[in-house]
Amino acid sequence: MRIRYERTIDDIIALNYFDFHHSSATQGIVRRYRWTGSIAIWLLAALLIYILVPGMPVFLTLLVAFLDAVFFAIMAPRIVLKKTMRNVRKRYAEGQNATLLGEQELELTDTGLIARSNYTETKLAWGAIERIETTPEHTFLFISSINAYIIPHNRIIEGDYRALMAEIGRRFQPGQPLQKITP
């Protein structure tokens, strides 16, 4: 059983977007950015207001600075997401990425999956799939914490996606190595 599909830069962006929202490591980075940035903005804003608006009551100065910091805390995840997606798009625009983009194929075998493009062929044991995640537009077959085979639902060229996923679900065995062939 196999499917063929077209993968674009938007699919890679979708994987990074999914990772941004579901990775505990990424969320930790966002939390640190949010709180350290908020504290820095609160202190800087308070200092600037104190210097630029002499005679303003201390309470009002701290309140205005606090509101600036709260605004930053609310906006920080959006800022980080926008910068991350822009950087991902820039990185993938630097080369042709012929092995990642374009027509792809996934074939199921008794021992695992064979992933093909016009330039690569990779054999994976069923155990190489760590987890399977699905969004309305994509299915991600994760083979590490940040690397996945991306199946865009709306660009399947050939094959039965539902049957393929049912079979993958049936055979999904995280951690089981590829069977060695002995002569």
Image (cartoon, grey):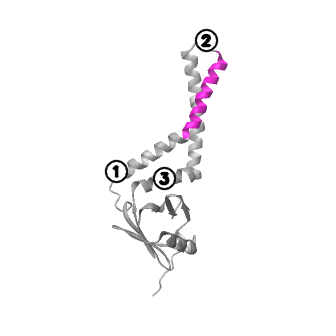
Q: Compare marks 1 and 3 and give the one earlier in the sequence.
A: 3
Does the image show residue 46? yes
Inspect the image, locate mark 1, and give the three-letter code of the amino acid beneath it. Answer: Glu
Along the line of sight, which residue is nearer the eye, 14 or 124? 14
Residue 16 falls within the magenta-colored stretch: no
In the rendered structure, the answer to whether residue 150 lies left or right of residue 50 reads left
The dot on residue 177 is none
Q: Position of residue 90 (x, y in %)?
A: 38, 47
Tell me the SS state at disc 2. Answer: loop
The dot on residue 16 is 3
Does the image show residue 152? no
The dot on residue 55 is 2
Inspect the image, locate mark 2, and give the three-letter code of the amino acid beneath it. Answer: Gly
Q: Quadrant of the C terminus?
A: bottom left
Residue found 56% across the figure and 26% down from its top:
44
Pointer 2 local density, CA inside 10 Å: few below 14, some 14–19, many at least 20? few
Residue on which disc 1 sits: 94
In the rendered structure, the answer to whether residue 72 lies left or right of residue 13 reads right
Residue 69 falls within the magenta-colored stretch: yes
